[in-house]
Image (cartoon, rainbow, N blue to C red):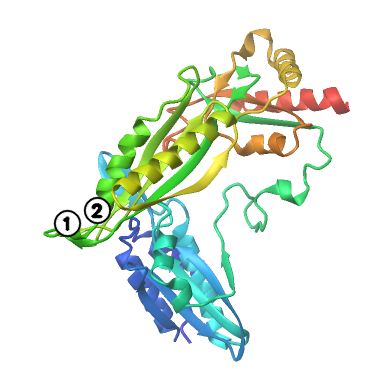
Amino acid sequence: MTIYDPTALRRELHEMPELALHEKHTSAYVAEKLKALGIETHENVGGSTGVVGIIRGTEPGPVFMLRADMDALPFVIDGKPCCIHACGHDGHMASLIGAAMILAESRDFNGTAHFIFQPAEEPGSGALAMIDDGLFEKFPMDEIYGFHNEPREREGLISTCPVIIKAGVIDDVDYALGAHIRPIQDVPAGMLCAAVRHTASTTLTIVIKGRGAHASRPHLGINAIDAACALMNGIQAIWLDPKMSWSAKATQIHADSGATNTVPDLASITYDCRAQTNELMDDLLAQIRRVAAGTAAAYGAEAEVILRDQSPACLYDDDFVAEVADAIKETAGPDKLAPDCGGGGEDFHNYKLARPEIKAAYFGVGVGATPGLHASTMHFDDTLLPLGVAVFENVVLRHLG
């Protein structure tokens, strides 16, 4: 029997990154590996690059689906556009091929296993494309399982409940204190701020469904790109309270009919949305939904707004924040307390949202991080980290010492 080393598979897949709906070499590689294992393999599922492998057990039973994503992320390095597997999809595919190898060897189970290799996870359109292509009708299933590498977990751990709130971890918590290093633009190196004023953040993808047609007869189709462009202009025209901070920024656009002379029937736009308060975020999302529905209808298309990731705005207790400020002055010195700063989004605030009685605060540690957080070349002075440790210790001992 063919034996694959998942590590070697991952490294080979890492060398062939492809963007959403362009995973041609990747899908061919996956299909080749499945076929070599004697697995029934279906290609071009979803009208593009989706792959489905089927393993039937020795006895009838439930049908379950195991899924991995295939697309890479776009980058610009040294002024040149490229794509990189920077989200772990190469590892997901290698793991799923490895699971298929083990099950294909013995087939000693009851039921059927469907192995789904899905394109276009990043723009949020790949699953919908496969469903629209009849995934569930062609490959009926009873259960669906997926997984993702998790950078927030310790190496070697597997988490079945990423939201620890549901596990009851904070049921008996009275105080929640968080911290984050700050870039030099927010807090000077060697100083600390008592509160990082995070905004609410939402990542969403709008999928526009039109109707394909030959470009010489565009009146027979509904161009998803035209509708997407109009939709983007509509979102730019959204008006909210000018005294409040908010934004909706398009960060990814995907549309490809597969040829240069056809009108595409599918397009997707991913937005990064920010709002100063949770209530303002609710208003922003409501307006985006109205713009999406109205614009799509004007073109005879359909639009679906898919919320992908959400974090609430900061929810702090003033007395606890004041206590953290005192701890900073005691441990680092009165001249080391910097003004509060902004700081993007943070899911820490879900704790307070879930249990409002918890007293919450979140401080920032100036470590001279440059050029900024999330930059590929970010570096900072790790000798300043003990400043944050001292604040944690001081606050804990105030209550438990």
Q: Is residue 122 above or below residue 279?
A: below
| Residue at 64% across, 8% down | 335
> On the rendered image, what quadrant is the C terminus found in?
top right
Q: Is residue 315 left or right of residue 18?
A: right
Three-letter amino acid code at the position of disc 2: Asn
Q: Is residue 153 left or right of residue 305?
A: right
Q: Is residue 382 visible?
A: no
Around disc 2, counting alpha carbons within 10 Å, would you say few (fewer than 14), some (14 to 19), or many (20 or more)?
A: many
Q: Is residue 79 visible?
A: yes
Task: Say whether marks 1 and 2 touch (CB < 8 Å).
Answer: yes
Image location (x, y in percent) of residue 286:
49, 38
Local SS, label 2: loop
Q: Is residue 161 above or below residue 180?
A: below
Image location (x, y in percent) of residue 93:
46, 66
| Residue at 51% across, 29% down | 275
How many numbered marks are there? 2
What residue would you read off at disc 1?
218
What residue would you read off at disc 2?
223
| Residue at 41% across, 26% down | 239
Residue 307 marker: none
| Residue at 44% across, 29% down | 247
254 or 187: which is nearer to us?
254
332 or 94: which is nearer to us?
94
Q: Which of the two discs, 1 and 2, labels the residue nearer the N terminus?
A: 1
Image location (x, y in percent) of residue 48:
32, 67
What is the distance, in whole Å, between disc 1 and disc 2 at their CAs?
Answer: 8 Å
Three-letter amino acid code at the position of disc 1: Pro
89 or 284: which is nearer to us?
284
Local SS, label 1: helix
Image location (x, y in percent) of residue 256:
26, 56
Of all residues shown, which one is farthest toward the left?
Answer: 216
Around disc 1, counting alpha carbons within 10 Å, would you say few (fewer than 14), some (14 to 19), or many (20 or more)?
A: some
